[in-house]
Image: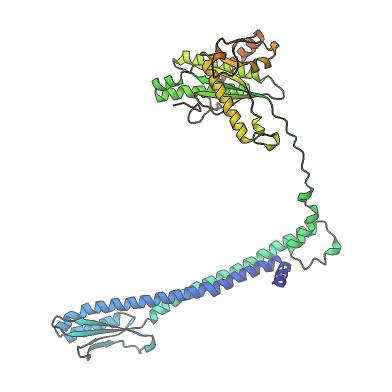
Amino acid sequence: MDTLSEHLKKTGLQKKLTLSAALLSLLYCLLILPLLYFQLNSLATSQAQLFGQTMSRQLLGQVRQPLLNQDAVSLQVVLDNLVVHTAMVKQAAVFKPDNSLFAESVEASPASNSASSEVFKQALKLANGANWQVQLTLDPSTLQQQVMTIFWLVSGLGCLLCALMLYWTHRLGNDIGTRLQNLTACLPGDEADTEANTEDDEVSRLEKRIAPLLLKPATIVCEPDTREPAQESCCLAIRCINLPQLQAHLSHDNLHRVLKRFDDIIAATGELFKGERLSGANNCVYLRFVASANDSNFLLRAISSHLSLVELQREQANDEGAGLILSSALAIDPLIDPLHKGDDANGSCQFMQDTAAEATFGQLSATSLLADPWQLLTNDTVKTKIPAEAGIYFEALAGASTNASSTSEAFLFTDLGSEQQALFERQLAYLRNRLSENDQPHWQHSAQGNPLINIAS
């Protein structure tokens, strides 16, 4: 077996393809054709039996009346018509109750081989109690000839296809082998080993020539992880205070329009202030703002995003008579950077990240409940991270620390400085202009089908 395998490896590609095609042709001749032959013979035998039984029953019905009338002439005419007009019927006879011949019709041509004939007998009981017998002799050679004609046609067509496949594989192997040889000749190699490798096939010679040019997996140098560390981020929770009331009083279309407009506003502000929208819950929408390399003032972007949402929602409520009333809460996000989330190198795990996210969202949702309409609440951690020169002012929220849901004293955002206020007015004007173009073809809505906000039951 090893010798045969080594010999096949040294055989050229053209011979390998031709040999494969020859084996398939041999398999067709040794398996498919005999199976077809036996199947057709079995079908011809069953059809001959069925034909003989059917003709015998029909003949019984035709000779019953002439036998009752003892009409030998009519009976003879029936038998002669059956033999003359039916090719497979060679003899038809009727026997009396004492097994003596009453009428018979035999084909005028020379008798066929009796070994291939089949005889069918049927008993006929008349009304007078006499038991007659009808006999038919069939020659199934005609049906056998038709079956063999089909067999030889299929065999000839199969052999022709096999010959065409052999010719095509021979040409294909020759063409591929020539091209591989040309490629091998163009590659650098040791000419001294050319004669030693003449017994190898074209693919093996090409592999040996191209092997020095390939980069081995062992030579691949694993570069150290140069990813930047996770950036600091914050999370803004925007609560829709009157969403249950709108759901109860507005129609489905009007509620869908209000929420869809809110989605568009969030999409526009998120694009401007680089905020990532997270999954919402408890009538809240969560936005994450990550400190970038060039702009680390992510807290200012979060506060500006809140102010923009408030102003735009107020304008919508005044213009359309129905709109969402918002309150917000802001906190430093303890989660790692989403780009590195789930990486084992940072010493964290997916379960701890999910738990931290759930705790953060729960704290933000509880803090947003303390805020009045259009207000923004935050904790001392956020307040201390904003530099004094930023022009952002907070004041302590009286009585907030007594609430069990608040983990630390809450601070209320009060005002922007003059410089920040001027910048915010320009940003707000840009957002108004952007939202006014939402009917233009270039505007991409925040949701293609339904609003993204989660309506709590």
Task: Indicate the quadrant where residue 270 lies.
Answer: top right
Task: Indicate the quadrant where residue 212 lies.
Answer: bottom right
Residue 438 shows up from this direction: no
Q: Position of residue 56 (x, y in %)?
A: 27, 79
**Which residue is more in the foreground, 114 or 376?**
376
Q: Position of residue 58 (x, y in %)?
A: 25, 77
Task: Give the image's coloring scheme.
Answer: rainbow
Residue 296 shows up from this direction: yes
Task: Indicate the quadrant where residue 341 lies.
Answer: top right
Q: Is residue 385 above or below residue 355?
A: above
Q: Position of residue 392 (x, y in %)?
A: 64, 11
Q: Residue at x 27, y 81 (%)?
A: 82
Q: Residue at x 34, y 88 (%)?
A: 109
Q: Is residue 368 above or below residue 151?
A: above
Q: Is residue 138 above or below residue 388?
A: below
Q: Is residue 125 left or right of residue 16?
A: left
Q: Is residue 233 left or right of residue 224?
A: left
Q: Is residue 225 above or below residue 72?
A: above
